[in-house]
Amino acid sequence: MMKPLCAYGSALLVSLILGLASAWWAIAAGGAGAIQNGAWRYNPRVGSNAAGLYARAQTAHAGPLALNQSEALYLLATTDDAGNVLRCEHKYRLIGHNFQARWWSITAYDADGFLIANSRQRYSYSSASLAHDPTGEFVIHLSRQPQPGNWLPTGDGQTFFLALRLYNPDAALREHLATWPLPHIVEDGPHG
């Protein structure tokens, strides 16, 4: 009598662990349906009628209120272009061009998803606040220490991530986001 009960209990425990692990993967790590373009990752189901339970849970976990895809696209970067995790003690350059969108922003968050506290109260750059050259190219320096030009602090933690939000994106951008040229994140090395 005890043997079958232990076997059922063990099977239930293993099932519970596997179920929780798969749910974590699908929600926290982007999971099924997520598309990678360079360092940037997005789920095309977020903000669409096709969003299932995992996509809706991922949106709730990340915190943004997902607008319809014609109104906004949300992309996250947790690594640089080489695939290395974004580390606060390293310096990076984020290099890109203006987007075919009415308005856009790039925001840095700590590993827990909070804005990174800093004395300059600089948390993000937008299409309206970013200095760029006449061709529309911009460079944002990501580091703990202040840098000249566009600078976003990375904080004193271990890791950070970036969120790119594109508001009222052009139809071509929405349709070809998987191959669209997105900002590069290039490591400049550890702080000296």
Image: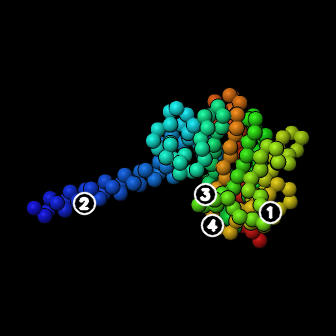
Is disc 3 placed on a helix, strand or loop? loop
Q: Which residue is mark 4?
A: 158
Residue behind mark 3: 113
First reached walking from the N terminus: tag 1 or tag 3: 3
Where is residue 88? Give x, y as percent: 68, 64
Residue sitting at the far front: 65
Q: Is residue 153 above or below residue 32?
A: below
**Quarter of the image with the C terminus in it:** bottom right
How many neighbours does mark 2 have within 10 angstroms: few (below 14), some (14-19), or many (20 or more)?
Answer: few
Q: Which residue is mark 1?
A: 120
Q: How far separated are the C-alphas under marks 1 and 3?
A: 19 Å
Q: Residues within 10 Å of mark 1 (few under 14, many from 20)?
A: few
Residue 2, compared with residue 80, is above or below; it is below
Helix, strand or loop under label 2: helix
Under circle 4, the secondary element is loop
Task: Check disc 2 and give the amino acid type.
Answer: Ser
Q: Residues within 10 Å of mark 4 (few under 14, many from 20)?
A: some
Q: Earlier in the sequence, mark 2 or mark 4?
A: 2
Q: Nearer the viewer, mark 4 or mark 1?
A: 1
